[in-house]
Image: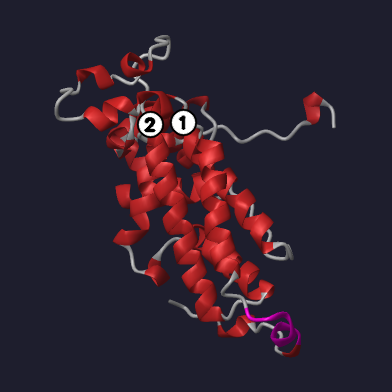
């Protein structure tokens, strides 16, 4: 298609492109990324988009709905393949993908971790529930019973979010400083009260989030694999995804 015939969005009032839900949420995500969650208000978002804040209520009923939408938008970047027969490799890949997602959107991590707690499971936005549904399908397809699959999911995400929050706390004060104690700002801690923490400065400065995640996943996945039924039992009793709990 030639550029002259490429489809264009109809302009709104004042010649601006018409708003869409995706455009509103993308702008909200950008605002959170640059200024933090506290900056996300209808008024501030309206300023960013150059529109009357009241017009945004067509796309989000309130600020809470806006936060839910941002959470969905970020989780939509996470690819999960329930049909993958190598469930351990799939969970390892998802973990690394979610870690990179969190590092790209650090200001959204509190939403990913705490936002679901504010809403009963069945009332949450569908986009926030799809990772759960897909991972349950992956695990039941691997041979876990429905309830066991739910236990695995909880252990997996509990570990994963804990790792992500821990990694984001590995705050470097001065990236140009070569001395580990100074680089991490640990020299500010009273030496008598924190001798062990100060002594760990070299190890803390060499923290490798990806490698640390892999080590933890190896421990976790080997333990989870031990909960699988034996191979003969799997063959004679194919997994039934229809009995997945609604939680």
Element assignment for label 2: loop
**SS label for mark 1:** loop
Q: Are marks 2 and 1 in contact (CB under 8 Å)?
A: yes
Marking on residue 207? 1
- Tell me, yes or no, whether the highlighted magenta stretch contains residue 184: no
Q: Position of residue 25 (x, y in %)?
A: 46, 41
For the residue pair 116 and 201, the one nearer the viewer reads as 201
Q: Is 121 situated left or right of 235 in this image?
A: left
Q: Which residues are magenta?
A: 229-235
Alpha carbons under labels 2 and 1: distance apart: 8 Å
Residue at left offset 46%, top offset 57%: 157
Q: Residue at x 35, y 34 (%)?
A: 169
Whole-percent x, y for residue 199 in the image: 31, 26
Most extreme residue toward the bottom, as rendered? 236
**Split into 4 quadrants, where in the image is the N terminus?**
top right
Residue density around tag 1, few if under 14, some if 14–19, many if 20 or more, within 10 Å: few
> Which residue matches tag 2?
170
């Amino acid at each position: 298609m030639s550029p002259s015939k490429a489809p264009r969005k109809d302009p709104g009032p004042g010649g601006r492109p018409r708003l869409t839900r995706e455009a509103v949420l993308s702008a909200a995500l950008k605002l959170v990324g640059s200024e933090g969650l506290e900056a996300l208000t209808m008024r501030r978002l309206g300023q960013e988009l150059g529109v009357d804040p009241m017009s945004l209520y067509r796309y989000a009923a309130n600020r809470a709905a806006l936060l839910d939408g941002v959470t969905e938008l970020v989780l939509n970047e996470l690819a999960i393949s329930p049909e993958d027969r190598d469930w351990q490799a799939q969970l390892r890949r998802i973990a690394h993908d979610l870690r990179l997602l969190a590092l790209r959107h650090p200001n959204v991590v509190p939403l990913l971790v705490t936002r679901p707690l504010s809403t009963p499971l069945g009332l949450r936005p569908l986009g926030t529930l799809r990772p759960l549904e897909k991972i349950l399908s992956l695990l039941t397809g691997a041979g876990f019973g429905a309830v066991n699959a739910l236990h695995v999911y909880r252990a997996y995400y509990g570990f994963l979010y804990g790792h992500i929050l821990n990694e984001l706390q590995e705050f470097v004060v001065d990236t140009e400083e070569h001395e580990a104690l100074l680089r991490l700002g640990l020299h500010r801690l009273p030496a008598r009260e924190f001798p062990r923490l100060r002594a760990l400065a070299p190890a803390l400065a060499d923290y490798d989030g990806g490698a640390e995640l892999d080590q933890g996943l190896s421990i976790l996945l080997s333990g989870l694999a031990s909960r699988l039924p034996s191979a003969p039992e799997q063959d004679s009793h194919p997994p039934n995804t229809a009995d997945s709990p609604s939680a």
